[in-house]
Each structure stands twice: as structure tokens, then as C-alpha cells.
């Protein structure tokens, strides 16, 4: 009898216990707390790792200089020397031309641009120059914005030159090693043929890379640096602005008046993103499940009706809703010309925004979910029915996991998109109602971070607009990383192969 009880107890203890929501939340909070506690330690480890990499790199190039021949050693001073020593004339001329152009740029422009980057200009007066005929001409002084822009360009040029400089050294040492073991070195013709054949992707990617640096990286760095200056209507580009460090960040999130606006706007932004994302998503899933039921007649007709909201441009729908719900719109006419403006109250304005967004967003979720439902293997449902599973169980165990797995990245994209959803807020309420207690610097009761940023830019408050843009990026990055790392699309990919 005792042996049976022991077996029963062991079999019961071997059954895995179900994780409740509270247990999962407790573990996640514990991991998040551990992450915060270990953050300084991990930062120190990262710095040590970077320092170790720099040290190993220096040792490597010292070894190259020590073991290389005269051509390799000269390549540390004159780029292309290693190629000239191996009679690779075209490669040597290319490296030498790069070095000469860089020196020419730094002497006549780059050095001044670097100086201007740190000073942001020193003389903002108009100089009067007398021409040969006795006429005068006014010449404007420094421009802080141009000093900052040209300084960023100079830094990018220096970084690119450093990369090419070390590439020249590595190329010289590789050619030296190949010549020592008796390998035939490629000629310029061979390199050119290889570049447009096996490595043609390098040419195409190089063109794209230059475009990305010129039109994405450069403006991005420029706008980030604006956040560390006092660039606004009182400190313009021509009158001069200066570096102020972290003062703008302290103004937004510190104990000043702006912090009483930033945190309410941030809270509403996150609340709006949650409602706009998950209400649209789950209602779209429910609508897709309803339309895709086998006993529903006219499924294509129903889908067509809902797709019409997608076919109509979003800004048209938003402007139409603004007119319908306005104080003199048809809906207010029904209530007896009350003249009531639903957008004058923060609570009603926020509810209307969420409801209008449902009208616009649900069809997208419905279409995506419909495609997923059509591709779930019917054998899974058949096996579940044989095992006695009900409809609710099949939805929780089969349908919902498949939908969440496929749409996990889409949900993250939608959430970030709603944080930055400028159109619906600006076209419906413009960020209002304004004049709310505690709000300042152009923020209103329905303002998101992105619409508040737009208002600041319109008021020439570029320093705080840039700071707000950085903080918005930080919020979006943290949310994206945390949600994706904990989504089934990241953790349980092998279960859906």
C-alpha cells in the first residue's frame, strides 16, 4: 500500500505545474530588476571589451609594422606605398589620391570646420568691405547651423579616411605575405574584372551606402546634436547658439515646469498606443473569425465593405470625421444645434480619437488575420475535435498561438507606428484642447510626443524639439526590444516550423 502511495505521489509530482499569469509577471519583473541592477556592471564590461579590442588592434598593427618589409612600413606614412612596391600601380595611385585629397580638404576646409564644430562660430557681425570702385559690400558673419553641419561632415570624412587608411595597411601586408609564399598578385585588370563580376554587389551597395550616409546618417547626427545646444528663436543660426550639454534633457524630465507637461503627454502617448494597437488587433481578429465561419453567407461581400475604409485615403476619412463631429456637423444637428464641441473636452476628444481609429484600423487587422486563418492546417482542428476539445480550447491552443506567432512583429510595428501616429491626432484635434492645466509650450490634451515635437518646431524651439525626438526614439527602442524579446515570434520559432 505504501509503495502504491509513493508511486502515486511521484507521478503527481512529475506533472508540470501550470504557470499562472501572476507567476509569469513576477519572473519578468524579477528579470527586469536584475537587468537594472546589472546595468552598470554590463556597461563596464562593454567598455572593457571595447578597450581590449582597441588594445589588440594596436598590437596587431605594431606586429604588421615590425614584420613587414619597407613597402609595408612606408604604407603607414604614404598610402599606396605597399601597392607601388608590388607593382600594383593602379591600386597605389588610388590610395595615394585618397590621401592627397584628404590632406587638401583638411588644410583648406576640414581644420576650420572642426574648429567651427566646437565653437559654433565666433563672429556674427556684418563686415563692410570696400570694393575697388569705392562701393561697399556687406558680408555676413558666422552661421552656427552651418558650422555644426560642416563640422559633422568633417568628422564623417575623417572617420571614412581612417577606415581607408587601415585598409591600405592591411592590403599592403597581405600583398607582402602573398609575395613571400610565391602567390601571383592580382593586377589592376584582375581587380577590375573581379569587382564587376564576383564582387559587383560591392559597387551597388557602395552607392546605396553613400546615399544612406548623405541623406540619413548625416541629418540624423545633425538633429541629435541640436538637442545639446540652445538653438531656438532667441538664439538663431545667424545670431549664434552654443553648446549647453544636458540642459535641455533636464528641462524636459527634470523638476522644471516642462516636466509637468512631458510626463502627462508621455502617459497619454503610451495609453493611446496600447488602445489603438490592441483594440484594433483583437477586434480585427474577432471580425476575421466571424467572417471566415463556414456558415456565413456572402463572405466576399462582407470583406469588400470593410476594405472600403482602406481604399479611402486616411486623411479624407479623418477630415470627414472632424466635420461630422464638429460643433456644426450633422451629428450635433441631431442633438438640436447645441453648438457643443466634443473636441473641447480632453476626455471626450481622446475617446473620439480611439473610436475613429478603430473604424480606420480594424479592416487592416481583419485582412491580415484572414490570411493566417486560411493557412492553419485543418488537421490540427480535426485532431483536437477527436481529443474532445471545444471551440474555446481550440481557439486558445491552436488559432491564437498561430495568429500571435505570425503577427507578433506586425503588432510591434503597429505599436511604434501609433506612438508616432501624427495624422490622426493632427487632423482630428490638432493636439487640442489647449489651455489645459499643467500643459505648456504648445502641448494640448490629446498631444502625442510627435505632435508636440511638431508644435515646438513650428515655434522655432528646435533645441527642445530635437531633445523630444531623442526621448521618443528611446521610448520606441525600449518598447520594441522588450516586446520582441518576449514574443513567440522570437522565442518559439521552432514550434511553428
Image (tube, rainbow, N blue to C red):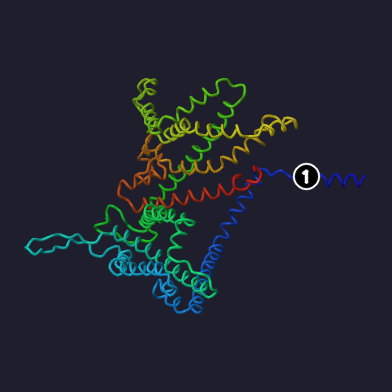
Q: Is residue 248 visible?
A: no
**Is the residue marked by circle 1 packed among few (<14), some (14-19), or many (20+) residues within 10 Å?**
few
Q: How many marks?
A: 1
Specify the quadrant that holds the N terminus: top right
Is 55 situated left or right of 234 in this image? right
Q: Is residue 5 visible?
A: yes
Question: In the rendered view, would you say 323 is above or below 239?
Answer: above
- In depth, the one of 307 and 261 nearer the eye is 307
Residue 370 location, quadrant: top right
Q: Secondary structure at mark 1?
A: loop
- In depth, the one of 329 and 42 nearer the eye is 42
Question: In the rendered view, would you say 488 is above or below 171?
Answer: above
* Residue 151, image x, y percentages: 33, 62
Is 132 situated left or right of 394 in this image? left
Q: Which residue is mark 1?
A: 15
* Residue 82, image x, y percentages: 44, 73
Question: In the rendered view, would you say 329 is above or below 185?
Answer: above
Residue at image coords 37%, 63%: 157
* Residue 38, image x, y percentages: 58, 60
Amino acid at each position: 500500500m505504501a509503495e502504491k502511495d509513493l508511486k502515486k505521489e511521484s507521478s503527481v509530482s512529475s506533472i508540470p505545474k501550470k504557470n499562472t499569469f501572476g507567476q509569469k509577471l513576477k519572473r519578468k519583473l524579477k528579470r527586469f530588476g536584475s537587468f537594472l541592477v546589472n546595468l552598470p556592471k554590463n556597461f563596464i564590461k562593454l567598455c572593457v571589451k571595447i578597450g581590449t579590442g582597441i588594445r589588440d588592434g594596436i598590437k596587431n598593427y605594431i606586429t604588421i609594422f615590425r614584420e613587414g618589409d619597407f613597402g609595408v612600413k612606408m604604407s603607414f606614412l604614404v598610402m599606396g606605398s605597399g601597392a607601388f612596391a608590388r607593382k600594383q600601380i593602379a591600386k597605389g595611385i588610388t590610395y595615394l589620391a585618397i590621401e592627397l585629397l584628404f590632406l587638401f580638404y583638411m588644410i583648406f576646409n576640414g581644420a576650420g570646420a572642426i574648429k567651427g564644430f566646437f565653437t559654433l562660430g565666433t563672429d556674427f557681425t556684418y563686415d563692410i568691405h570696400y570694393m575697388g570702385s569705392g562701393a561697399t559690400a556687406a558680408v555676413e558673419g558666422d552661421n552656427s547651423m552651418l558650422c555644426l553641419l560642416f563640422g559633422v561632415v568633417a568628422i564623417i570624412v575623417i572617420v571614412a579616411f581612417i577606415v581607408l587608411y587601415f585598409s591600405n595597411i592591411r592590403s599592403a601586408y597581405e600583398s607582402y605575405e602573398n609575395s613571400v609564399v610565391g602567390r601571383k598578385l592580382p593586377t589592376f585588370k584582375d581587380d577590375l574584372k573581379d569587382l564587376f563580376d564576383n564582387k559587383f554587389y560591392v559597387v551597388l551597395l557602395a552607392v546605396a551606402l553613400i546615399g544612406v550616409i548623405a541623406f540619413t546618417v548625416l541629418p540624423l547626427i545633425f538633429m541629435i546634436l541640436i538637442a545639446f545646444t540652445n538653438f531656438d528663436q532667441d538664439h538663431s543660426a545667424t545670431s549664434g547658439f552654443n553648446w549647453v550639454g544636458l540642459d535641455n534633457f533636464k528641462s524636459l524630465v527634470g523638476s522644471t515646469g516642462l516636466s509637468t507637461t512631458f510626463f502627462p503627454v508621455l502617459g497619454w502617448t503610451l495609453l493611446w498606443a496600447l488602445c489603438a494597437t490592441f483594440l484594433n488587433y483583437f477586434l480585427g481578429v474577432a471580425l476575421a473569425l466571424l467572417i471566415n465561419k463556414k456558415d456565413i453567407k456572402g463572405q466576399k461581400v462582407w470583406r469588400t465593405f470593410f476594405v472600403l475604409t482602406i481604399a479611402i485615403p486616411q486623411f479624407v476619412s479623418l477630415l470627414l470625421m472632424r466635420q461630422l463631429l464638429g460643433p456644426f456637423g450633422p451629428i450635433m444637428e441631431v442633438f438640436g444645434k447645441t453648438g457643443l464641441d466634443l473636441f473641447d473636452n480632453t476626455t471626450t476628444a481622446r475617446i473620439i480619437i480611439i473610436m475613429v481609429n478603430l473604424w480606420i484600423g480594424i479592416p487592416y487587422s481583419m485582412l491580415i488575420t484572414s490570411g493566417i486563418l486560411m493557412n492553419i492546417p485543418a488537421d490540427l482542428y480535426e485532431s483536437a475535435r477527436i481529443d474532445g476539445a471545444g471551440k474555446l480550447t481550440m481557439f486558445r491552443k491552436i488559432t491564437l498561438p498561430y495568429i500571435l506567432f505570425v503577427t507578433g512583429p506586425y503588432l510591434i510595428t503597429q505599436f511604434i507606428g501609433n506612438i508616432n501616429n501624427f495624422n490622426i491626432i493632427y487632423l482630428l484635434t490638432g493636439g487640442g484642447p489647449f489651455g489645459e492645466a499643467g500643459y505648456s509650450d504648445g502641448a494640448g490634451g490629446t498631444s502625442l510626443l510627435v505632435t508636440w515635437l511638431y508644435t515646438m518646431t513650428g515655434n522655432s524651439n528646435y533645441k527642445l524639439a530635437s531633445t523630444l525626438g531623442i526621448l521618443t526614439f528611446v521610448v520606441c527602442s525600449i518598447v520594441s526590444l522588450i516586446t520582441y524579446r518576449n514574443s513567440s515570434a522570437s522565442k518559439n520559432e521552432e514550434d511553428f516550423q
